[in-house]
Image: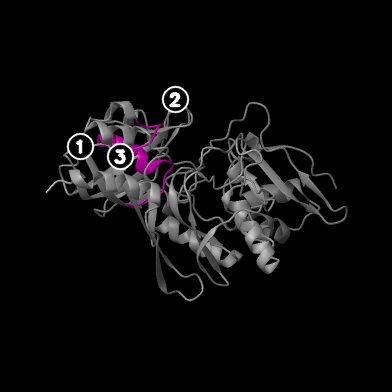
Amino acid sequence: MSLSKVLQVSEKDALKRLDVFLAENYPDLSRSKLVSLIEKGIVKVNSQVKKNSYKVCVGDIISVQFIDKKIGSQIQIETNPVGINPEFDQDQDQDLDPDLDLDLGSDLFNQEQHIEPKEYPINVVYEDESILVVDKPAGLVVHPGVKTKDNPTLVEAVAYYLKSKYGMDSSRVPRSGLVHRLDQDTSGLIVFAKEELAHKKLACQFKEKTNLREYTALLGGYLKEESVDVESYLVRSKFNRMSFKSLDSKELEGFAPDTTTNIDPEDRYILNFKGQAKHRILVDKNGRKARYSCSHFRKIVSYDHKLSLVKVRLDTGRTHQIRVHAKDIGAPVVGDTLYAKMSRLVSIDPVVDEVLKKVPRQLLHAGLLGIIHPRTQEKICFRSELPQDFQKVLYILEKLEDN
């Protein structure tokens, strides 16, 4: 049986269910086997995991990757033929976190990768038979990718920890247990699933907003209001593929609701904090996708009416969401070289100015994580203190605190 071929949907197969389409192309595999492959995420449509009921569209690239037990080797159908350029952040909610690592290739995250355990110290905040909560330091990339080379990543360090302590193989859990992410230079709490059921339940919480995520950030601007709610549609920049931007009202005119058949009706809308229904995804004529995002900023203290320390809670988890929204309100995260230039910070005094210019990373910390435990269904909450580099900056700013 040969599986080494590219399946591309033609007009005659358009709108067939995914499992029906596969059954017609793989007569040697049973329907139940194909359904199982789809449910396990082994079948990808344009590098995305879809449901059995997904209606295939003209031009879709269907890929299957699994182990042939007869010969013990990996068989893979080409996932990215010439001319296909899949989006890095795929259709599913990017509630794999607001600060998605940019050190990955175009769609490595959406493919199951073999994770090689690497020894590296991790700070375990909590652990039981289902979950592992880790406090990630700034500078550590979450997932291996094109640019990480031989440097250890958090996923590899967790794999080493689980293997050395329990003999566990993290590959038996989808995405090696990773449920959400933090950018390389963002510090704070990340939860890993140690079993498949826990992964499914946690992933659902992040998508349905039943969990709690709160960040602490130092912003390079003064917030006049005690709280600011920011809603926007985020799209990848045309000029810098590493960054994102919020669409303005004029740009929004070129986008329309995504009504393609691969989106379930219940997933097309999202209720905002006012109870209003918002389209989850908008698309333009070129297929560029803009995703609804919402962040809530609450001012804790301001310094010399020029800097603001804030807590940020998320309703959605889009790539770089906090950092883009901070820039949108005129107060980018201090140390964020992608969305702000430190040379443009308002001058405070020579000593403070010099300290802020030398901040080596964005001062953004995931300090509070609340989840519903996937086994016990209890609500549990974890806290992480600000790291020393962040505390040092706040200590220097103390004398400038506004009354």
Counting from the top left corner in percent of width and height, residue 65 is at 72, 48
Q: Identify the main secondary structure in magenta.
A: loop
Which region is colored magenta? 313-340
Which residue lies under the disc numbered 3? 326
Counting from the top left corner in percent of width and height, residue 241 is at 48, 29
Q: Which residue lies furthest to the front in this view?
A: 351
Residue 324 magenta-highlighted: yes
Question: Circle 2: is it few (<14), some (14-19), or many (20+) Cα within 10 Å?
Answer: few
Left or right? Give the position of 6 relative to 152: right
Counting from the top left corner in percent of width and height, residue 146 is at 62, 36
User: To which quarter of the image does residue 151 belong?
Assistant: top right
Mark 2 or mark 3, earlier in chain? 2
Disc 1 residue type (three-letter): Lys
**Alpha carbons under labels 1 and 2: distance apart:** 31 Å
**Alpha carbons under labels 2 and 3: distance apart:** 20 Å
Q: SS for tag 1?
A: loop
Residue 362 magenta-highlighted: no
Which residue lies under the disc numbered 1? 306
Q: Between residue 126 and residue 212, name the one nearer to us.
A: 126
